[in-house]
Amino acid sequence: MTTTPDAQAAAVKQAQQALMAGDFNAAARQLDGVLAAEPGHVDARYAAAVCARYRKDYPAAQAHLTALKRVAPEHGRAWQEEGHLLREQGEADAALAAYQRACRFNPALIASWRAQVELLAAAGDVPAAALAGAQVDRLSALPKDVVAVTDLLAEGKVLKAEHLCRAFLQKHPRHVEAMRLLADTGVRLGVLDDADFLLESAAEFEPDNIQVRLDYIQVLRKRQKFEAALAQAQSLYERDPENPVFLSHLAIELMQTGDYDRALELFDRVLAILPDDPLVLTSRGHALKTMGRQDEAVASYRAALDRKPDHGDAWYALANLKTYRFSAEDRSAMEALQQAPGLPHQDQIHIGFALGKALEDAGDYEGAFEAYARGNELKRLQTRYTSDQMAEEFEAQKSVCTPALFASKAGMGAAAPDPIFIVGLPRAGSTLLEQILASHSQVDGTLELPDILSLAHRLRGRNKFTDRSRYPRILEELSGDQLRQMGEAYIENTRIHRAGAAFFTDKMPNNFRHIGLIKLILPNAKIIDARREPMACCFSGFKQLFAEGQEFTYGLEEVGHYYRGYVELMRHWDAVLPGEILRVQYEDVVTDLETQVRRILDFCGLAFEPACLDFHKTDRAVRTASSEQVRQPINRAGIEQWRHFDAHLNPLREALGPALTGYRD
């Protein structure tokens, strides 16, 4: 039996060589050994399907493909192989559908494009055959290395793709498609500044390359360069105001800058052209939700599901309203979808979390935990997070950010008192505190602004994997002018989110890891630590599928270790920055709202205003998962919900350790 990963890889390679030599029996023996030890081995399962087809054992080939698609539903070559299998058996229509799905997951599969040309032409669909033929021509014209990079990216082999693409660009530095693909690897690896530079350069080389421009918009948005992204989207829109792709991108960028009315107008224009587009219907629902128009948002999400019943994003969007309740028919539909072969990985994740919420609301706590656990397991496959690495980062902050550091930098930084940072863990009540503050006449509520995280990323440098301690160590080297410029840049870059009040909130929870940086560049900023009882907070995070980041939440042990590290780091900040941070316990806010509101306003130097007690009446856009909850009067409903799942939470308790009871210290 082949057990070690290296031995399995060697066996698969030998099997592939046997396949090429036509020795199908030898190939099958090698692959059977790998699959006996590791039934989910993707490469072995794929090769076994090919081997079975070559042997004309069509049932065995289909069984291998079904198993493969369960563990890797977006494996383009699996769908291509299914197309070959179906075509050999005379099932032209099913083969065509498989080839089309193969190209959706892996656009570099030229064999699938060619097969589509032949099948579409045979069916008399000349226009569609011509479109597929254009893809064949495009791929044929590209250098083989560039096609290989596309293939590697589709298979998730990002580091290999980056290495090959960089090597190609060293020889062909102005090849635009290679630049675009290298930028794609940068996005996947979190190196957004490199991706930004590559796409900006590529757009200058080929201004009419629409895909480059679309990729550039997305990178600008990820970097929170909202005005630049909006300008790019507006430029595309002006080229062709009736193009639904350009309309959709402009609508999305308008949402980022807070112009929801115009965004909705553009979404409606797209739907007049493409009335059944589930992606547009879902995006429109997101805009309506953010504006507080819940009934209309629900209708838009349900319309998306009517058009595409397996659209996971719409299912989860309904769950993420928090106040929405699924029907028994909805639960049955989601359960059936989970068993459907070929459901894309991301849809599986969305539906797993949505089904967990639906079953929890129905009182089926065992089923709910199983669904949440499955969603987290699938999501964890997409992350590279480790608790050990995060613990190293926490310790680095403690070792560098000492009283001596702050004493040596006293009086430096930008003097602006405008920002009120609300930090902590997600699902700890930060949206509630923001809504309370944003109800004050002198405070603008903004977003979870990524500016501090982006600054920390830049200070860490390009070699963040080989020199993780460069930041925060570099804080010791920054001059007064540099600290002041960073603080002023933060104030200027966040201005787009403000409406003219003297103060504004920044509620990015993970900023607690960078309080030292914040107080060096903005010494007069206020910092509020939103804290919640650990079992409730951590399990609420475990149940939540976040749009981006928060990778520590996708495992009970991981989120427990993170909470423990957070408590210990906040204890350090309290020691080195005495009196600079206000801790607000969520349970205290729920128990005695007015006392806590007055306490918060006093800390921020703001006069009491009754509107802060009636925060649920404040009309403003709220993007976080708590958007509907903060539009209702305060209640205790969520404090004890975790107890329904108590039997499953021992790994969380163990990971929390002393923070389980010492979180208020």
Image (spheres, rainbow, N blue to C red):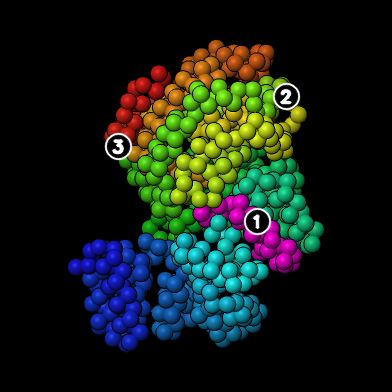
| Image position of 657 (left or right of 552) | left
Q: Which mark is residue 651?
A: 3
Instruction: Report the magenta stretch's main SS.
Output: helix
Give the vertical position of 282 relative to 655 (above or below): below
| Image position of 571 (left or right of 141) | left
Q: Which residue is mark 1?
A: 197
Give the vertical position of 351 relative to 511 (above or below): below
> Is tag 1's residue or tag 3's residue first in the polypeptide sequence?
1
What SS does tag 2 mark?
Answer: loop
Q: Which residues are magenta?
A: 187-216
- Quadrant of image for the C terminus: top left
Q: Are marks 1 and 3 in contact (CB under 8 Å)?
A: no
Q: Residue at x 46, y 44 (%)?
A: 468
Q: Look at discs 1 and 2 and give the one toward the viewer.
A: 1
| Image position of 32 (left or right of 494) | left
Q: Amino acid at mark 1?
A: Phe
The x and y percentages for residue 600 are 58, 17
The x and y percentages for residue 544 are 46, 40
Between marks 2 and 3, how big is the CA–CA gap?
A: 45 Å
The x and y percentages for residue 598 are 59, 13
Q: Residue at x 76, y 29 (%)?
A: 500
Q: Amino acid at mark 2?
A: Ala
Which quarter of the figure has residue 540? top left
- Quadrant of image for the N terminus: bottom left
Number of other residues with Cα within 10 Å of mark 2, as a class: few under 14, some 14 to 19, many 20 or more: few
Membership of 122 in magenta stretch: no
Between marks 1 and 3, how big is the CA–CA gap?
A: 44 Å
> Is tag 2's residue or tag 3's residue first in the polypeptide sequence?
2
Q: Nearer the viewer, residue 642 or 456?
A: 456
Q: Which residue is mark 2?
A: 502
Residue 254 visible in the shown view: no
Which quarter of the figure has residue 139? bottom right
